[in-house]
Amino acid sequence: MDTDLYEKLSTMAEKLRIPETERFKWVKEEIERAERKEKEEKDRDERAAERAMKIELKKLEQKSDNGSTGSKSILGSRPKIPPFNIKEDEIDLFLERFEKQAQFLQWEKSSQIIERSLEINKDLYVCFIDYTKAFDRVRHEEIITILQQLNIDGKDLRIIKNIYWEQKAAVRVEEETSNYQNIKRGVRQGCVLSPDLFSLYSEMIMRQIEDMEGLKIGGHNINNIRYADDTVLTADSEEKLQELLNKVVEESKNKGLELNSKKTESMIITRKTSIPKCEIKIEENTIKQANSFKYLGTQITSDGRNHQEIKSRIAQAKASFQQMKSIMTNIKISIAVRKRLLETFIESVLLYGCETWTIDERMKSSLEATEMWFLRRMMKIPWTAKKTNEEVLTEAQTTRQLMNKIRKRQAKFVGHVIRRNQLEHLVTTGKFDGKRGRGRPREKMLDSLADWMNIEKPSEMIRKMSCRDGWRSMIAHASRHGT
């Protein structure tokens, strides 16, 4: 019998003025009722988890990247356990102790590492890791052991156990169905917990390389940055990168994970016109050296610039506009409404990841031309009309706003990074070992942001970011008067 529960019920019985002769009986009945309710909830969770995993295997052939074919499995309908019932705070707090799990700040970290490395004319060696069926190979016993070490509510932990330990599946081909078998590995695709659970799992692998050399920034060693199964190894030489990859391959095998040598790619980010060759191997297989790679939806190129990414975003935004052309060019809809639609559906595509863009004059002209491209088509103004941009803006009852929106988003984002005062702050402000190369230095995002804010030095701007309210006021002022 739970002593704490007994004492609470005894106090409640006293407040309810239950006679002492009947008090013990009443308390006992209440405890039995609570135990029955808990058992019923547990049984219901177990039944739900078991029913959830009936899989129908249909004969659909799907060509894979390596040329082989395989069957596609279709999940049957299943009862859903609301994800908000499980508290993720404890998992998030655990992950925050390991700063390389940057989550949504990956953009800022990766772009700043590239920018700062090229500033001192140092080549950056990176390896983009891809696991074969990463989420499907997580061992349940090990992930539950990790969760038991965290301060997670017992009921929440039981739900996770039931989802992963007690689930069963059957394979059906045409009219034949196999026996139900326990599923002993893998996290559920589409579950909000899956990225965090995999991050916990991968953390156990990456702990084994945390003392190996990568990049030195402000006295700190950074050899990997991650978000769920999207992992990047970083180093300042080919030899160090190969050593890191060898260790990750070894530790991943111990955890039941396997690297896909056909999708894992290396890259050298450099200012040199001729890109050096880099032969990185997974066991005996040499992986591809890429000139560009899409990481977390953003294009990273070997020259360290944003030109290709911005051009790609412009093309995608124009394609989205064309899909909505019948609405965006409909003069029966007011221009105010269409501008709101433009901002919601088109600019959201165009400005994805803009918080880390370093925009030079060439890219600024392209973005401003794109803004006018949208307005001219919304107003149905052909090029033969010979109307200037100012006339188009007046007719559309608006002004140029795109660059201000980008700078405003950058200022808010960088301010958040600086106030967070973690690894992203170090990457942004820390000292890199090395000397600046010859010639004119490239324009940096912080420099262009300081110009927009009308602040003389980036260091002074970073100091002002520490006051959230003051920084917000400065952003609002720059938005009204910025260029």
Image: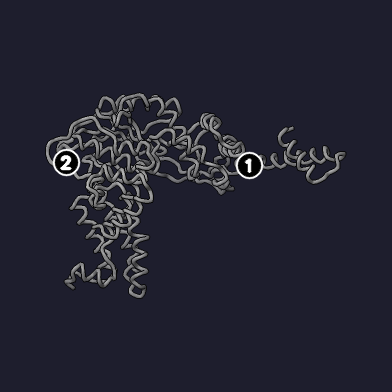
Report the residue at 17% width, 34% height from top. 436
Residue type at mark 2? Answer: Pro
Dot 1 falls on a residue whose secondary structure is: helix
Badge 1 or badge 2: first in the primary sequence: 1
Where is the C terminus found, in terms of image quarters? Answer: bottom left
Q: Residue furthest bottom?
A: 332
Q: How many marks?
A: 2
Discs 1, 2 touching: Cβ within 8 Å = no
> In the picture, residue 172 is in which quadrant?
top right
Left or right placement of residue 244 versus residue 382 in this view = right
Q: Is residue 475 above or below residue 433?
A: below
Report the residue at 52% width, 30% height from top. 146
Left or right placement of residue 201 versus residue 110 in this view = right
In the foreground, 348 or 57: 348
* Marking on residue 314: none
In x, y percent, where is residue 411?
Answer: 31, 50
Within 10 angstroms of label 2, few (less than 14), some, or many (20 or more) residues?
few
Left or right placement of residue 398 versus residue 162 in this view = left
> In the picture, residue 111 is in which quadrant?
top left
In the foreground, 471 or 365: 471
Q: CA distance from mark 1 to mark 2?
A: 61 Å
Dot 2 falls on a residue whose secondary structure is: loop
Where is the N terminus found, in terms of image quarters? Answer: top right
In x, y percent, where is residue 48?
Answer: 62, 44
For label 1, the residue is 45
For label 2, the residue is 441
Residue type at mark 1? Answer: Asp
Report the residue at 33% width, 31% height from top. 222
In the foreground, 303 or 457: 457
In x, y percent, where is residue 175?
Answer: 57, 45
Can residue 195 be spotted in the picture?
yes
In the foreground, 251 or 481: 481
